[in-house]
Amino acid sequence: MAWFLAFIFLFAAPVWGTPAHAAPPIKIGAILDLSGPGFRKGQIYQFMAQKAVETVNQRGGIRGRPLKLIVVDDQGLVRRSLILAQRLISAEGVVALIGPSNPRAEMALRRLADREKIPLILISGDGPLFRQPAQPFTYNFKVGPALPPAVKALYRYLKSQGFQKIGLLLPSSRSGKKALIWLRAYAAEFHLKVVAREWFSPGDTDVETQLRHLDSQGAQAIVSWAEPKALATVVNSWQGKGLPPLFLGYQAASLSFTPRLLPPEVKATWPRFVLQPEDLDGRFLLALKELGRPPEYFSATAWDAIMLLAKGLNRSGANKKALRWVLENLDTIELISGTYRLDRNDHYGLRPESFIITGLIEGNLVR
């Protein structure tokens, strides 16, 4: 009997002691621009997504199975994005996709995800993800900053400070026109009146004329929602001119526009995690340190896409249809980029409280 028990122990031990990662991996595909026009952003996405996968695996994986990230380089080309996404689904057997880093490929990938019935976590673009007629939606989800919750956060602050009339200064680009839609749409909800709107070209080096026109129309505050380089032009044109208070969009927290460029009297719509890094996951901060960057929304978005999928997969297992259902029905979720509350009509759900409206002096908050 002793010999028999020893025999059983000898051959059973490898099974009992088998590490979780000996199980077949659950594959996630990432479609990123790693060698095209947006390669710098794409490489940040890739690094942080891989670090998030490593963190999930170090914490036990998904029901004892490891995650595996398969990254493809679409070179910033929409057609190549679709070809590579199809290959990830058909040849690699991924259960979900994240991407693209090129916003121009977003709609095409959304249609493909719905057609192939595979969850897609969008990590670029600044639009919401509401259910709309004739728009792909069912298998599409999104993380990261976007216009609607950020505009609501800013307008809530302006209302609390007693502002009633605002002027808008926006770039005459596609992104500026998109911002105008949401800035107008939410104004009435917060009892704000847009008294005037001014455009400027992305290449302009001075916008004082537009700022003074907004002032002449009775604007009590000026809101500018633009890309980082353009925001720097706006700030320089506004500073020291005796104009109404200036408020900026969340692009102020991006790669090339640092808090040091902001005079303390200018307030911006900051993603909460940029200003409160002490509250973040320690492994996320270690990854940022290795990357050599401060907290910023590119890095947070890639990390959050993986963590959102991990939360869903832990409940659904490696089943694409079940994963879609679980993601849609998750309770309130705390991710790096903020607080999310998804439902059947909103596959984004970032809450306005994920943003802080404040000024900065040498990186310190000024309320």
Image (tube, rainbow, N blue to C red):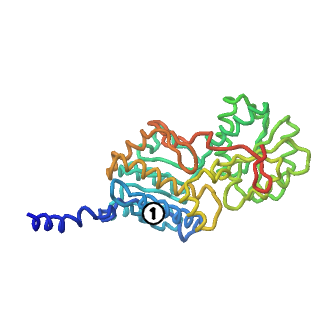
Identified by mark 1, the residue type is Glu
Kind of element beneath mark 1: helix
- Please tell me whether residue 168 is drawn above or below residue 163 in the rendered image: below
Q: Which residue is mark 1?
A: 54
Q: Residue at x 13, y 63 (%)?
A: 5
Residue 297 position, x and y percent, is 61, 55
Q: Residues within 10 Å of mark 1 (few under 14, many from 20)?
A: some
Q: Height in image: 92 above or below 309?
A: below
Q: Nearest the camera: 180 or 223?
A: 223
261 sits to left or right of 29: right
Q: How many marks?
A: 1
Of 170 and 4, nearer the camera is 4
Position of the C terminus by quadrant: top right
Front position in the image: 187 or 294: 294
Measured as percent of width and height from the top left, residue 276 is found at: 65, 50
Q: Residue 332, image x and y in percent? A: 50, 39
Residue 4 lies, in percent from the top left, at 10, 65
The residue lying at 42 percent from left, 57 percent from top is 59
- State the residue at coordinates (85%, 36%): 217
Q: Residue furthest bottom?
A: 35
